[in-house]
Image: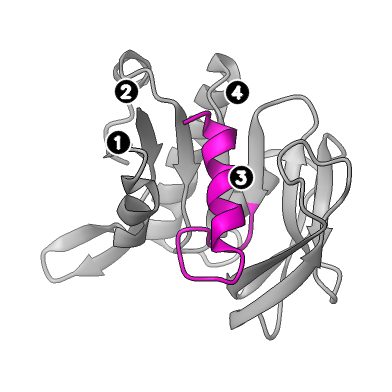
């Protein structure tokens, strides 16, 4: 099994650094999934498809370019737009986590992403929309580490859950295999077992 994953970007004295959260390796370890990164600077559609990935994860870290205009955010935005198109065109399951969910939301017209308060190093207990294809529980508790939240999303998405301040925490595309979660399933949280099950079933691993 193979999951392609994006990395957060940072600068050091030698140039741009790709940062990967070890929690992703631990998250998929029991399923013996290979976590594979594709270079932001060498997007090759054919090579990606040759890998026959079971899915793609757009991870957290960095910010959307329109929110914070810098080179790293622009590089990542451009790359993730290509990955979203590739997944849609080839029916590859796509999971967006935190910033990755924001990238997916921004890709579709009609989204609104705003600055939010009290969403860093906290958790949310969320009611789950009974019509969700992937979440079958009534309540889920997820962590939160973001400064920007999704206020509105394209009508092609089913809103699965919202926070008390009316920001979208989980949404799924009504017809395409796309799921967005503002929390981090790979990090500790009260509903870690439930989130593992959801992600495993989403990718069919």
- In the image, residue 187 lies in the stretch drawn in magenta: yes
The front one of 114 and 36 is 36
Q: Residue at x 45, y 52 (%)?
A: 74
Q: Residue at x 38, y 58 (%)?
A: 72
Q: Are marks 4 and 1 in contact (CB under 8 Å)?
A: no
- In the image, residue 20 lies in the stretch drawn in magenta: no
- Against 11, residue 74 (above or below) is above
Going by the image, does 78 lie left or right of 140? left
Q: Which residue is mark 2?
A: 44
Q: Which residue is mark 4?
A: 88
The front one of 10 and 52 is 52
Neighbour tally class for label 4: few under 14, some 14-19, many 20 plus, Cα within 10 Å: some
Neighbour tally class for label 2: few under 14, some 14-19, many 20 plus, Cα within 10 Å: few
**Which percent across, then down, holds residue 21?**
33, 61
The front one of 105 and 125 is 125
* Among numbered discs 4 and 3, the one appearing first in the sequence: 4
Q: Which residue is mark 1?
A: 38
**Which percent across, then down, holds residue 17?**
22, 59
Q: Residue at x 29, y 18 (%)?
A: 47
Q: Residue at x 61, y 64 (%)?
A: 191
How far separated are the C-alphas under marks 4 and 1?
A: 17 Å
The front one of 200 and 46 is 200
The image's mark for residue 94 is none
Q: Which residue is mark 3?
A: 198
């Amino acid at each position: 099994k193979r999951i392609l994953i994006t990395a957060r970007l940072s600068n050091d004295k030698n140039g741009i650094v790709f940062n990967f959260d070890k929690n992703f390796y631990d998250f998929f370890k029991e399923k013996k999934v290979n976590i594979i990164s594709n270079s932001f600077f060498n997007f090759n559609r054919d090579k990606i498809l040759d890998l026959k990935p079971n899915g793609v994860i757009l991870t957290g870290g960095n910010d959307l370019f329109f929110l914070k205009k810098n080179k790293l955010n622009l590089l990542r935005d451009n790359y993730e737009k290509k990955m979203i198109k590739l997944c849609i065109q080839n029916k590859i399951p796509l999971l967006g986590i935190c910033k990755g969910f924001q990238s997916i939301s921004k890709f579709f017209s009609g989204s609104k992403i705003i600055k939010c308060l009290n969403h860093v190093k906290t958790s949310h207990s969320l009611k789950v929309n009974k019509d969700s294809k992937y979440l079958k529980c009534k309540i889920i508790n997820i962590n939160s580490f973001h400064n920007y939240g999704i206020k509105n999303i394209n009508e092609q998405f089913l809103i699965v859950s919202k926070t008390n301040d009316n920001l979208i925490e989980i949404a799924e595309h009504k017809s395409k295999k796309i799921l967005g979660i503002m929390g981090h399933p790979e990090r500790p949280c009260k509903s870690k077992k439930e989130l593992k099950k959801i992600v495993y079933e989403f990718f069919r691993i």
